Image (tube, helix red, strand yellow):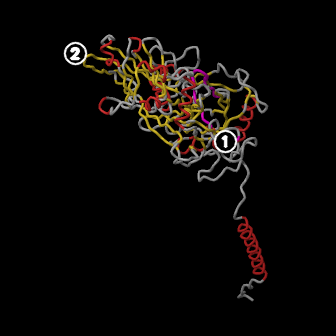
Amino acid sequence: MPNIFLREKENTYYEWYSYTIKNYSQVISVTKQVWAECRIYERVTYSIKYEQPWTASSSDYFNVALYDAADNSKKCKPKFTYYYAYSDGQVVDKLDVYYSLLKPNNPLIVSFNRRDTNTYNCSYPGLKGLKWFYGYDLGYYSMKRELKVELDDQYKELLKGKRLTFTAGPYSNEDILVNEYDLVNKEFKKHIYTPDVSKRGPYELYSGSLFLDNSRSSGNNLYLKGVANKQFDGVCMYSSYSGLQLFVEFFDGEKITQLRRIGTTDKSQWIELEKPFTYKDDRQLKRILQYIQFCLNKEILVRLDQQGGNTEVRIVDGETTATPKPINEYELSVNRGCDYSEIIDGYVCYTHNLNDYYNVYVKNQLDDLRILGESFRPDVYLELSLTIDNNHIYLFDESGYTSEFLYYNPDKDGNLYVYFLQSSGYGDRGLKPLLFYYNGKAYKQSNSKDHNTYWQRVNVINSLAQVAVTPKSINLKDVLDELKTSSKTNAASTEPPTPGALPTVKPTTGGGKSDAGAPKNDGVTPKNENSTHSFIGGSLGIFLGMLGSAIAIFSFWNKPTTFNRMR
């Protein structure tokens, strides 16, 4: 009699049956896949191979028992038994058990596939209530509607129609049930958040209790705009076994919203995926998580002041793209000239070959993560780490208050271009970069004093780039000319002035907050809370000064006459 262990979802095991003086085996092969017809469910298939052919005297050899266990050691009593196949056609060769991805330990429907080519879908809670029935009764107890409709109803009944609301905030809620599961030989973990139907609600899941890692995204809620204040059936968070969060899915009926982590592990952020990942089993899910984890540990170092050669490890002379030089690990080649950005008189442009770096160093490693024979591959996001004189560059939007970060996706993004003022002497060495252009965005220094620290975005028109022009766009040449004039003015003065077109408040790494956590003032000088004390102190100083002057004049006119001995 085959024993079907519902907690065993991917394996092959053997069962034995004694008939007369001989033992006969049954081989049960178990596979699990996301159900192709609706991705919010998974299907576990138990394929049974019998050693003995059916005979009337051996019908109990073909009995099928369902256990809520992983193996024989903890099977207890069966939840249901399919008894006595009275013909060869009534023998069950395969069972398909359907689960919600949000409730992987709660079977919803069991499909009996018999040798007579008929399939019978039965409610698992209904089977548990019946305990058993004979093979000829199967048609009487099977469901009559389409499988998808029955699955939806079974899941709603399991959760009693309850849904959770995802809310931005640092709080936790006891009305949310959290279950942890190991994935892929304990290489990754999955945490599933669903309403705890044993409680009354309000079933609010706060972002602070879901996103546990400190990351760039924790400073703002922009990454939550697609999911905040909305209701979901549940949420799945995937992480490495050490606890590094990587990937999250929000389930709303058949719609799944996915967010992935990008950047580096110490300064990452979350983005919503325009094209959601699709995976059919845990093997592909493992590859997705490995891709994301790999990208979190990789960044491309871009030295904006580099002119020619390679940016790392060693310097190689290479001034033209016609004769590319080989690069080693962590090297990024730099060539004079631009291919997909404007060439402007009076300025020299250098190309940082991101694609070369990716093809030489990263691509093969990512290809090794692919499943052999399958073309599926998640998008790659490698963070760009920008420096000048070995100082890290912090990027901000046009306002100068919101932090921005750049990433390289080899399927969508091109190279990075840096503009310098063309030198009248020999070569361009030693010049400071004025502006860089990447993926439809241009950045310039926020002010001359913080040239090596803070840069902000400027809306430019690049004639060679296929980027939409907005009403506020400025010609690239006009921006460079402005920066050129500003740099000359600053070189002739002791205190470099801040360009008038730029904000007077220096951007900070806190996205508009001072290091002490004070709120941004958007360029408006804050009110001095000690203005009254300043007025009193200033007035008193003026009065004392006037008094001192009067005493000095009086002393001059009334000074004593020197004694004259000759008189």
Left or right side of 530 for 115: left
Q: Quadrant of the N terminus?
A: top left
Give the label, 2 or 1, closer to the camera.
Answer: 2
Residue bearing mark 2? 22
Q: Is residue 47 above or below residue 525?
A: above
| Residue beneath the point at 71% across and 68% down | 533
Q: Is residue 30 left or right of residue 272?
A: left
Residue name at image x 49 percent, y 20 percent: 363
Query: Label 1: which residue?
Result: 448
Residue type (three-letter) at the residue carrying disc 1: Ser
Across and down, in percent, residue 470 comes to 76, 30
Across and down, in percent, residue 327 comes to 49, 21
> Which image quarter: residue 74?
top left
The one nearer the camera, 449 or 398, is 398
Give SS at disc 2: strand
Magenta-colored span: 399-418
- Which of pointers 2 and 1 lies earlier in the amino acid sequence? 2
Magenta-span inclusion, residue 409? yes
